[in-house]
Image (tube, grey):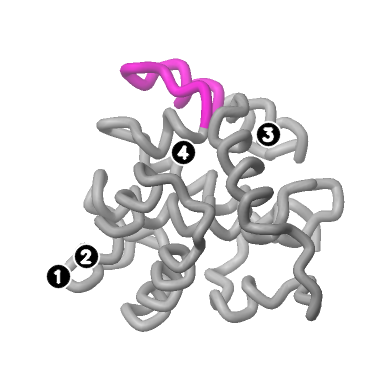
Amino acid sequence: MNDREIFDSQAISLAQIMTWGESNEEVWKPDELGAIFKHQLSAPLQVDFSNLSHPHMRRIQSLCLTASPPIESFADLLHHPRPPVELLEMTKEFAKICRSHAECRLPDEIATMLYTLSIAVALTKCNRRITKLDRQGLGYTFGWALSQSWLDPSTRELLEHGSQAIDREGPAADV
């Protein structure tokens, strides 16, 4: 499957995403994942997208530059007061691509966390549902993410808000 096919694909079940490349041995320790995640959040967002020859680079650049305040990193996007939904959708798709490409050197846990966070932020800050996962699937997704010991407090708070949003009558799926 090429980048375009993955980007355009229907929602993949979280169970399938979580088992890609699964092995019985632990590759990364929690403190290492925490450091990698912190680095990933601070890395320039446009650089990561361009490393995978993202098909919408010009649009990504435009969204990052026209946001107020401008978005330079994944942390800027996730903690933005009014994040562009389109950029959250692209981040979710970027994370899916990272799970299936050897050239993307993100650990699976980090890619899955970006996937989950983009969904949580879209739900809570944009009142938009950018996934076809049902309530049970979203509950499982947020439960997995919240169980990660390496999360920083502000990221955990984003996920908690996302988890609370699925417990209320939430927005209909936009995808």
**Amino acid type shown at disc 2:** Gln
Q: How many residues crowd mark 3 within 10 Å: few (<14), some (14–19), many (20+)? A: some
Marked residue nearer the N-terminal end (1 or 4): 4
Q: How many residues crowd mark 1 within 10 Å: few (<14), some (14–19), many (20+)? A: few
Residue numbers of the magenta segment = 60-73
Residue 12: % across, % down: 58, 73
Determine the CA span between mark 1 and mark 4: 25 Å
| Secondary element at tag 1 | loop
Determine the CA span between mark 2 and mark 1: 7 Å
Quarter-of-image position of residue 43: top right
Is 45 above or below relative to 91? above
- Nearest-to-viewer mark from 2 and 3: 2
Q: Is residue 166 left or right of residue 3?
A: left
| Secondary element at tag 2 | helix
Q: Using the rendered image of the protein, determine whether residue 59 is visible from the camera's viewpoint.
A: no
- Nearest-to-viewer mark from 2 and 1: 2
Residue 98: % across, % down: 71, 53
Q: Which residue is mark 2?
A: 164
Q: Which mark is residue 87?
A: 4
Tags 2 and 1 touching, CB below 8 Å: yes
Marked residue nearer the N-terminal end (4 or 2): 4
Marked residue nearer the N-terminal end (3 or 4): 3
> Image point 50% across, 60% down: which residue?
149
Front-lying residue, 37 or 97: 37
| Secondary element at tag 4 | helix
